[in-house]
Image (cartoon, rainbow, N blue to C red):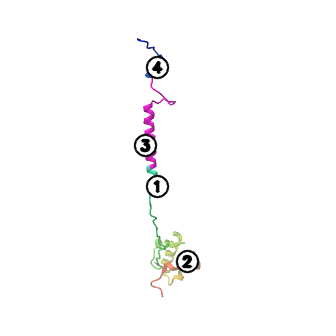
Amino acid sequence: MDDGEQFDATEVSKRNTPSESALGLTRSDQIFLVVIVVVCVGLFGAKHSRHFFSTTETIEVHRLADQTALFQIEINSATWVEWMQLDGVGELTARKIVDDRELHGPFEGIAEVTRVKGIGPATIAKMEPYLRCDDCL
């Protein structure tokens, strides 16, 4: 220490230790962290700004009216599987119809299907649009 310079230990210790914040980060760490946060916020904003500023077209969907398949079965040749396709006819009833037809001969008309036990006028009325008899009078 020459020419009147005095040794100040506090100033030397300030120069040798990096400046730290409350989180223990150096100045360069703080700058890096701020840059990363700004970039992330920018990317987030860019991604979500598409939603607010985009112009989308409304698409109209035209649906067809509900349609039911109209099919008919021939009462004197339909199998029990075909009879089961009718609403309200289960496997047991379908087998009864085919067994009755094989035992007593072909039906002479759609109304004659009521001779099968378990099929009454209400059931035949519900099934009638789906039945046909090609060899009936």
**Which numbered disc, 4 or 1, marks the residue that appears first in the sequence?**
4
**Discs 4/1, front:** 4
Gap in Å between the C-alphas at discs 4 and 1? 56 Å
The three-letter code of the residue at mark 2 reads Lys
Residue 134 in percent (x, y) is at 45, 83
**Which numbered disc, 1 or 3, marks the residue that appears first in the sequence?**
3
Residue picked out by circle 4: 11
The three-letter code of the residue at mark 4 reads Glu
The range drawn in magenta is: 16-45
Q: Residue at x 53, y 70 (%)?
A: 92
Residue 120 visible, this angle: no
Residue picked out by circle 2: 126
Q: Residues within 10 Å of mark 3 (few under 14, many from 20)?
A: few
Residue picked out by circle 1: 51
The answer to whether marks 1 and 3 mark residues whose Cβ atoms lie closer than 8 Å is no
Task: Relative to 46, say whether 83 is above or below.
Answer: below
Viewport quadrant of the N terminus: top left
